[in-house]
Structure formats: structure tokens, C-alpha cells
Image (cartoon, grey):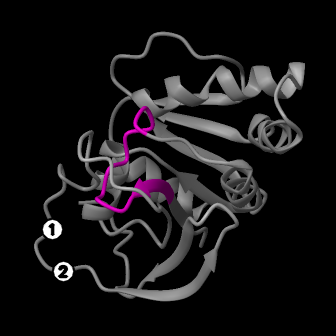
Amino acid sequence: MRKLIYGINVSLDGCCDHTRFSGADDIHDYFRKLLEGVDTVVYGRKTYELMVPFWPEIALTQSMDETANAFARVFANLKCIVASKTIDSIYNERTTIIRNNLREEIVKLKQQPGKAISTGGVELPARLIEWGLIDEFHMVVHPLIVGQGRRLFTEMSLPENLGLKLIASETLSSGCVALQYVNTKESSLTPP
């Protein structure tokens, strides 16, 4: 069974709005290493449009610093699945759109052979968490309080607490703390 991994940057006060803060080279390195262990990313439309075509084009031009260029090269080689009922065009043949039956499609994806699957963003991961489909959480906490912006998990509703177990932590050179948790609850891969 393939793992579904959720990775996100968040401020100390829970802001996950990328326009309120940005990361240093160590953040790109952290997420590059994470993506080296996956072969597929799953995004909602908003996150997809933030990541694509930006990173695939950086992979081609190599126009940023070496750390960002290395991240872009890894990202550009991944299969991308975008969950959207409204998107009308995709960047390249490595992208697939899921328009309906999202839960069932993600369950099928997890059951296919391959490396782990990564997801990011806010709305789509919230649904995946509600359905018990996220196996690992990689939270990079930035040492700042922004006081405004979109907050993590505000759109989510859980019938009970979701227990997580910390399996790794790392203080990055920028002062960010990378936390890796696993879901301690057995996921139900049976479609509703």
C-alpha cells in the first residue's frame, strides 16, 4: 500500500498563506528530499496553479539558485494529479484531472504499485484527512507570527480527534522546525 504524505509550511500562529512568508534554501532542500521519495503529487486546483507551470519551467530554465533549481528538477519529474471540477487545461501529459469520485480515486491510487504520494495545500488535504487517507504529516513550522492570512485546518470537521505520533523532528538552519508525524489510526480504504 502506498503512503499518502501531506507536507505544508505553517507559521507559529497557524498561517499557511504562502503570500505572508516564504522559506529559505533549507525549506527547498527539505521538501526536495521529501519529494525524492514519491512519484506522484495530488493537488487541488489552487495549489496546482501555484506549483504548475512555475516549477516545471524553473526545471527547464534553471533560473533560480541551485537549491530551488534542484527542487524544480525533482518536481518536474513527478506525475501530477489535480482534483478539480473547474480546471479546463493542464500543463503537460504528466498531469491527470480527477473531476468526480475523489475519495474512490485516491483509494485506487494508494492501492496501485509505486512510490509514496504527496499532497499539499489546504482544502484537498482537509478532505483527505477527514476520510482517514493521510498516512504521514510533514509540518515545517516557521519561527514567526504573521497575525493574519489563511489558517490551517479551518475547513475541516473530524468526528473525533486524530491521533498522530511524532517520528522525526529537525531544526533547519533558518530556525524552522520540520516535524514528521504518522497517523496512528488505521485508515479505511473502503469507498463509502
Number of numbered markers: 2
- Residue 182 in sight: yes
11 to the left or right of 160:
right
| Residue in front for this viewpoint, 71 or 44 | 71
Magenta span: 7-20
Quadrant of residue 109 in the image? bottom right
**Where does the N terminus fall, quadrant-wise?**
bottom right
The residue under the point 34% across, 51% down is 103
Identify which amino acid the numbered label 1 is placed on: Leu
- Residue 83 in sight: no
For disc 1, the marked residue is 158
Q: Is mark 2 on a helix, strand or loop?
A: loop
147 to the left or right of 99:
left
Location of residue 158 with respect to 105 vertically, above or below: below
Q: Are marks 1 and 2 in contact (CB under 8 Å)?
A: yes
Q: How dense is the environment of label 2, judged by Cα within 10 Å: few (below 14), some, or many (20 and up)?
A: few
For disc 2, the marked residue is 161
88 to the left or right of 61:
left
